[in-house]
Amino acid sequence: PLSKRLKLIADYLPDGANFADIGSDHAYLPAYVCLSDKTARAIAGEVNQGPLESAKKTIQLHQLEEQIDARSGDGLAVLKEGEVEQIVIAGMGGSLITSILEKSPAIAKSAGRIIAQPNVDARVVRQWFNQNDFILIAEEIVGEQGHIYEILVADRHTNVSSPYNDNPQIKDKQLLLGPYLLAEKNNTFIKKWSLEEANLERIISQMQQAKQVNQEKISAFQTELQWIKEELHHEE
Ligand code: SAM
């Protein structure tokens, strides 16, 4: 059975999807999508040999060779410009996801939709979308096996208007917390940011006790802590 996290990602692929799953590992996502939709096509990209072999095994096991192409390579280098309509990059840190997009901006921008699932640092992915003409159209937050995951969906051509506030301070807060997740504020969101609140408080007090105090960094963390507290403890 596919994880809740990967199922949620699959929900944002249309019928007849033509997508790439970059860092596909076992190719569970493309296999699930292509088994349930015979018109779907996928490219499973992997930079590491072991995971690439795992992907090939899954494809063989389900006889999906006609639908899924496993390719060896770094990030988007396995794709030609315009070859796929959707790009999924899941299960890595936000800065790795962003660096993969950054390395091949033309290929990234040739896709209509990017679905990113950063394990940490979703903020930098949201920023990349903003700076590269992708509009964030949806977000999900899901808890599974003791982890909390965020899923970001962004489109290049859409009627959806930007979810960010014009006020730069509010926008910065939305970039950290996620504009849709912040508006919805479900239990998983509350749980994630309660953990982050405790984390930040510990980090800030450690930084204040350090021999060389980095006041600029402390202030940045204090601002984030303030945003989190506003959302967790203040009634609107
Ligand atoms: N996407 C799957 C998921 O969400 O369940 C697998 C996530 S797994 C934790 C991360 C995978 O990304 C690993 O298999 C790793 O080899 C691959 N990876 C890391 N950097 C990569 C890169 N630059 N290009 C392609 N794959 C990469």
Image (tube, rainbow, N blue to C red):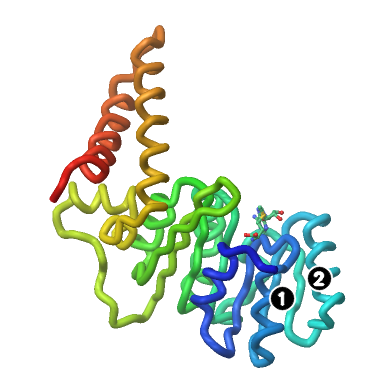
Relative to 157, does residue 90 appear above or below in the rendering?
above
Camera-side residue of 66 and 129: 66
* Left/right of residue 190 with respect to residue 20 in the rendered view: left
* Left/right of residue 122 with respect to residue 21 in the rendered view: left
Q: Ligand 1, what quadrant?
A: bottom right
Q: Mark 1: which amino acid?
A: Ala
Classed neighbour count for the residue bearing mark 1: other residues with Cα under 10 Å, few (<14), some (14–19), many (≥20): many
Q: Position of residue 162 (x, y in %)?
A: 26, 69
Any mark on residue 58, and which?
A: 2
Relative to 221, does residue 51 appear above or below in the rendering?
below
- Residue at point 44% right, 58% down? 141
Camera-side residue of 101 and 203: 203
| Contact check, label 1 and label 2, Cβ < 8 Å | yes
Give whichever of discs 1 and 2 has the lower sequence position: 1
Query: Does ligand 1 reach within 8 Å of label 2's beta carbon?
Result: no
Q: Mark 2: which amino acid?
A: Thr
The secondary element bearing badge 1 is classed as helix
**Does residue 147 appear in the picture of this structure?**
yes
Q: Give the image quarter of residue 201.
A: top left
Any mark on residue 109, and which?
A: none
Quadrant the N terminus occupies: bottom right
Q: Check disc 1 and report the residue beneath it.
A: 31
- Residue at point 56% right, 57% down? 100
* Left/right of residue 107 with respect to residue 23 in the rendered view: left
